[in-house]
Image: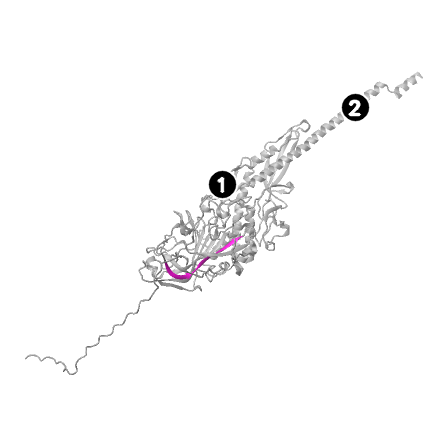
Amino acid sequence: MNVRKVRKRATGKTTRADRGNMLVFITASTFIIIGGLAFFALGYVRLLGTNNEQRTAIEAAALSAARDISRIAIETPEYGWISISDGAPNGSATKADDNYFVPVKGINTIIGTNRVCRIIAEELNDNWLKIIAEKDLELAKQAQAKLQAELVKAMAPGYVAKDVDDQPVEVYKNAQAAYDSNGIRMTGSSSHVAGTLKLTLGSLSTGSVTNTATPKPAGKAQVPAAAKQNGFYLSYTNIPVGNTDYVFAGIGDSIKLVDAKKWVASAPGLPYQMQTIVKAEADQQMNGHEVQGYKVHAVACAQPANVTDPKPAPGAFTFSFPDGLVPEIPNPGAMLSHARLNAAGGAGCSYVYAEGGDFPVDTGASIKNLGFPYSAEMPCNSGVVFRRGLFDWWKRAGTKLHINSAIAMLTDPNYNFKPPTPSTVHWKTPTKAGGSDLYDLGPIPNGNIHVYRIDPNTGMVSYQAKQLDPIEIPVAAHNQMYSECIDAIKKSSVGKLTVGPFMYPDTGDLFDTVYLLDTWDCYIRDYVYQPGTGPGGKHGGEPMSHPKTAFVRPTPGLLELGAGSMGAKKSWDSPPVMGVPQPYNPPGVKGKGKPPAITAQTDLAETAGYPTNFYQRYAVGSGIRPTYTQNGMAVDVRFRRQVDPGTFSDVLGIKIGYVGEKYGDAVPSKTMLPYVPPPDPVPVPDPTPTPTDPTTPPATDPVPSP
């Protein structure tokens, strides 16, 4: 029993000491488990915090890089200064040789503008305009490729790009600084893995909205609903016009983060594209005991931005008729259809540019042959030059140009040239250039200038006619297109006009007579043909200041209506097959250079001895060019009526010329005696024989002496 009692005590009961040991063990185990969980939780929270903080840092790096590439600008021979973003003419690096700045064109603006112009060419069904648009788009893509190459270089460590003020843009360095300044702050026990920050340019698999506006009106824009949003193009989407492809880069109205999952090195299925989406990625090394050796890799993507240039004064397209209107050219659209102006042979056209400055006012400036600067698919004629000038002018308006209004300028009778008032003016001219003694040669047709402007807000084309005199001679701008076409219009219905007889001193004749012929020559000045501060010459391919083109508020009765380069100068190894451009060869003056009433057959009047103030010239100054805020002359088409100098021919030494100095009726002139034909000579009668006396016998011959 004792034994049993002992066993019962041993198996059925525990002592107080046993119960205390077990409690200690359970408590210790619980603390160990809780401590482990807490330690793990601390590490996990740290990892989450680190990842979030590191994501904030990589986003800062991506945004910094996107901001910097929006600043980078380069100059190209194809399009002048270009960038991700438009830029007003205020960058010191863009200063032309005349000390004025030139604007910067955003790449999406360039593509969008070409697309608008191509639509207009399609609407007009003009094959030559289509070719010009295609060639311009090729140059735009060449310029885009150069900008793309610069941006790719800027992604690398150590590369220094430049902005419009010639200031350094160190994309990688600034991105690294942005990353570091937004680094780990939660626990402070991690570090960036040196060399792991990487910047890469790419595209988006799904296009984002740009800030490049679609054309107006929407019915002519040729943009599917899936390719636009709120009136703006989507990026990385092909939006063709006819058989020509148009793709816009990922550039918005503000710098912003985009979904990294949509980033691709190159968007598939596109004919071309420009990668502008910045992908930033980097690694962060964790240093705490709880996460020793763990690395966090984060990626962020950002899109750059474009600040749209309002283009407050795109410039004016003008038609100048200093000698009166040409009946065969009643409106701008006639330049597209007149048979001789659009002939395959070119009707004696020349294509030249001013070298060494503005001709003929700058010392050392001269005229050089440019050859045929267009595609060999087109003939050498004034119709092609006009189209190129028209295209260059359209480009000045950017994407705002209203399609219907641009077409109406060429097709709507409301844009026809208005006749000058009065229709005739007295031809008052001095005996020497700039002289004060004026002689009245008689009435001749009055001249005027027709100014077409594009409203910067609506894109609509307006029209205005103003008085013009021949002595308002626009210069040929440095490195810009100047074209002449002799005998452009022959046997005009305007007919011939005899001026005189009149009295004029020092011609060798008592009374003089000259003849205005029925033949017209055509001159085209394209001041915005070649952009850029280098290839574009001293004015960078910007419009010329002109008092007749600056915008003024319409006055009652004024007609206000609404609805450029193929780049660097080209030369040909051989002339185009459809025609050979004629060299510039102005006639020389063999006589004494009097009178200034008639100049040689050159619209630049370089042989007339005129003072420089007889010429319309570029403004002198610095900073923002006056024609950025006030319309200047972008393109001018000018018709000159040929003059047969008549009795002035021997003095001038020319057979054909133009009306030279001409002042209106308001200017007083010398009073000259009217022309009175000399009287016919009084006839002298035949001598009458002396009468004789009939009673007187006739005389007889004497009888010879024997």
Residue holding disc 1: 92
Residue type (three-letter) at the residue carrying disc 2: Thr
Circle nearer the viewer, 2 or 1: 1
Label 2–label 1 contact, CB within 8 A: no
Horizontal side of 704 relative to 498 (left or right) equals left
At horizontal 27% and vertical 72% (from top left) the residue drawn is 683
Residue bounds of the magenta highlight: 439-454
Residue 629 is labelled as: none
**Residue 16, position as x, y percentages in the image:** 85, 19
Residue type (three-letter) at the residue carrying disc 1: Ser
Q: Residues within 10 Å of mark 1 (few under 14, many from 20)?
A: some
User: Residue 652, relative to residue 176: is it above or below?
Assistant: below
Residue 381 visible in image: no
Query: Is residue 442 within the magenta segment?
Result: yes
**Residue 77, position as x, y percentages in the image:** 49, 46
Residue holding disc 2: 27
| CA distance separating discs 2 and 1 | 77 Å
**Residue 418, position as x, y percentages in the image:** 49, 60
